[in-house]
Amino acid sequence: MDVPLWLALIVVGVLGIKLIRPPWWLVVVILLGGYLLADSVFAPLVDSTIQ
């Protein structure tokens, strides 16, 4: 069974928010920061660090 990445991320995000209950502003900051970091000059550095 193939699950699209966006669906898996939504499910993990909803479960994480329901179980851990972080403040909504923290969720927004992490999502926005990740989005901005992925489109920045630091993206290759983060990619090489993760792999």
Image (cartoon, rainbow, N blue to C red):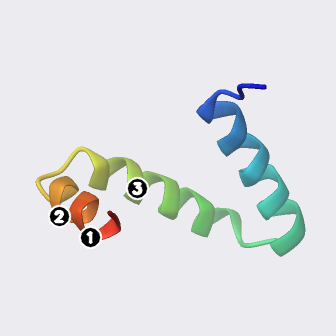
Q: What residue is shown at x 70% (from left), y 40% (from top)?
A: 8
Does label 1 or label 3 sit earlier along the sequence? 3
Dots 2, 3 in contact, CB < 8 A: no
Quarter of the picture holding the C terminus: bottom left
Q: CA distance from mark 1 to mark 3?
A: 15 Å
Point out the frontmost of discs 1 and 3.
1
Left/right placement of residue 32 relative to residue 4 reads left
Seen from the viewer's position, the closer of residues 35 and 50 is 50
Quarter of the picture holding the N terminus: top right
Res 47 → quadrant: bottom left
The label on residue 35 is none
Q: Amino acid at mark 2?
A: Leu
Q: What residue is shown at x 24% (from left), y 44% (from top)?
A: 39
Q: Among all residues in the image, which is located at the extreme front?
A: 1
Q: Residue under label 3, please give it.
A: 34
Q: CA distance from mark 2 to mark 1?
A: 6 Å
Q: Residue under label 1, please give it.
A: 49
Left/right placement of residue 27 relative to residue 50 reads right
Q: Residue under label 2, please give it.
A: 45
